[in-house]
Image: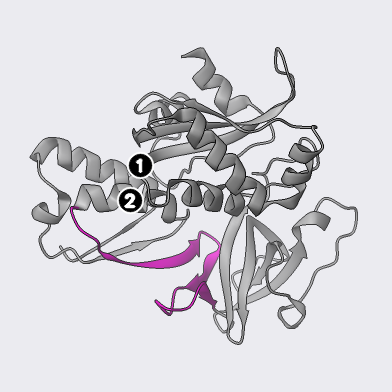
């Protein structure tokens, strides 16, 4: 086998099962494996764990597929983002994420988009969809040609205090916090704690570690600092003593798998929400 493709979280689970059965790295089981093709979620939070399971680095290519159509693919290992397909029977429109919930948000065409703005992706297709919201948000990394990254989901965000935190920001903050360390993370999600028993409210990170940090408090401090650099509104809330610094709570091994089992969504195309404005997910971990 030379190529393996899938959603990183579920391919990781497959690799872990193989490792448990065979007792050796995936790179020794599939000696010719040299390319991982992925989509659905950001690979970076999983990359270190993948390389540990495989026993070496392998090349990767990102795709942006969905049931509604095939939208973009990574066309370069040197440029950031995926090339948006403009000649595949799909007409794109874009709504700024901050305006999405307004009564009559403006829809921008491809010629009106800007770099670095978080847009909800709206599509009309020759298969019959008309002005359909696929639920994903994107940002443009290049306008010549048009390249994008998937920045999150419309319904997955935290703005309990007006901070407007999106998936891309928490993933980037986590990546920064673990860079250069031996910390490895299997899964995570973030939720606000609005009514703590004492002290100011805070963002609570629920993390299932493969390799834990030596100091959870120091890691939480690094994570909070990275998050403040990612999101200026969050930084303002910390500076203004509206929020206190982030809290990290450890999740037991396979805790996220247990959660997905509990809601009947283990496997397939189902994904762990990276963040939520509610505490429905994390309350499951609090009960365990």
User: Taking 259 as reference, is 288 above or below it?
Assistant: above
User: Taking 182 as reference, is 148 above or below it?
Assistant: below
> 169 left or right of 56?
right
Q: Where is residue 124 in the image (x, y as percent from the top left)?
A: 68, 70
User: Taking 140 as reference, is 97 above or below it?
Assistant: above
Name the residue located 71 percent from the left edge and 63 percent from the top edge.
119
Q: Residue furthest bottom?
A: 144
Name the residue located 63 percent from the left edge and 63 percent from the top edge.
138
**Residue 59 is one of the magenta-drawn residues:** yes
Which residue lies under the disc numbered 2? 48
Name the residue located 18 percent from the left edge and 66 percent from the top edge.
2
> 233 left or right of 41?
right
| Span of residues in magenta | 55-84
> 35 left or right of 7?
left
Mark 2 or mark 1, which has the lower sequence index?
A: 2
Contact, mark 2 vs mark 1 (Cβ under 8 Å): yes
Q: Residues within 10 Å of mark 2 (few under 14, many from 20)?
A: some
Which residue lies under the disc numbered 1? 184
Scheme of image coloration: one colour
């Amino acid at each position: 086998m030379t190529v393996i493709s899938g959603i990183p979280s579920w391919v990781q689970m497959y690799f872990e099962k193989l490792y448990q059965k065979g007792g050796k790295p995936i790179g020794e089981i599939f000696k010719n494996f040299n390319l991982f093709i992925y989509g659905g979620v950001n690979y970076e939070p999983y990359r270190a764990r993948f390389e540990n399971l495989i026993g070496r680095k392998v090349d990767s290519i990102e795709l942006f597929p969905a049931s509604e159509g095939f939208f973009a693919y990574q066309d370069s290992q040197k440029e950031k983002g995926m090339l948006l397909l403009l000649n595949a029977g799909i007409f794109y429109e874009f709504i700024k994420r901050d305006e999405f919930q307004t009564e009559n948000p403006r829809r921008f065409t491809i010629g009106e988009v800007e770099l670095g703005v978080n847009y909800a992706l709206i599509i009309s297709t020759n298969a019959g969809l008309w002005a359909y919201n696929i639920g994903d948000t994107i940002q443009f990394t290049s306008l010549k040609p048009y390249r994008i990254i998937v920045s999150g989901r419309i319904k997955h965000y935290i703005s309990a205090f007006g901070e407007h935190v999106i998936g891309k920001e928490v993933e980037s903050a986590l990546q920064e916090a673990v860079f250069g360390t031996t910390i490895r993370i299997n899964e995570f999600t973030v939720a606000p704690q609005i009514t703590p028993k004492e002290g100011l409210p805070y963002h609570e990170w629920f993390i299932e570690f493969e390799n834990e940090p030596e100091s959870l408090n120091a890691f939480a401090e690094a994570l909070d600092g990275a998050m403040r650099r990612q999101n200026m509104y969050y930084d303002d809330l910390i500076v203004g003593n509206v929020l206190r610094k982030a809290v990290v709570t450890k999740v037991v091994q396979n805790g996220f798998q247990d959660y997905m089992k509990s809601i009947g969504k283990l496997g397939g195309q189902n994904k762990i929400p990276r963040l939520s404005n509610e505490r429905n997910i994390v309350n499951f971990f609090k009960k365990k």
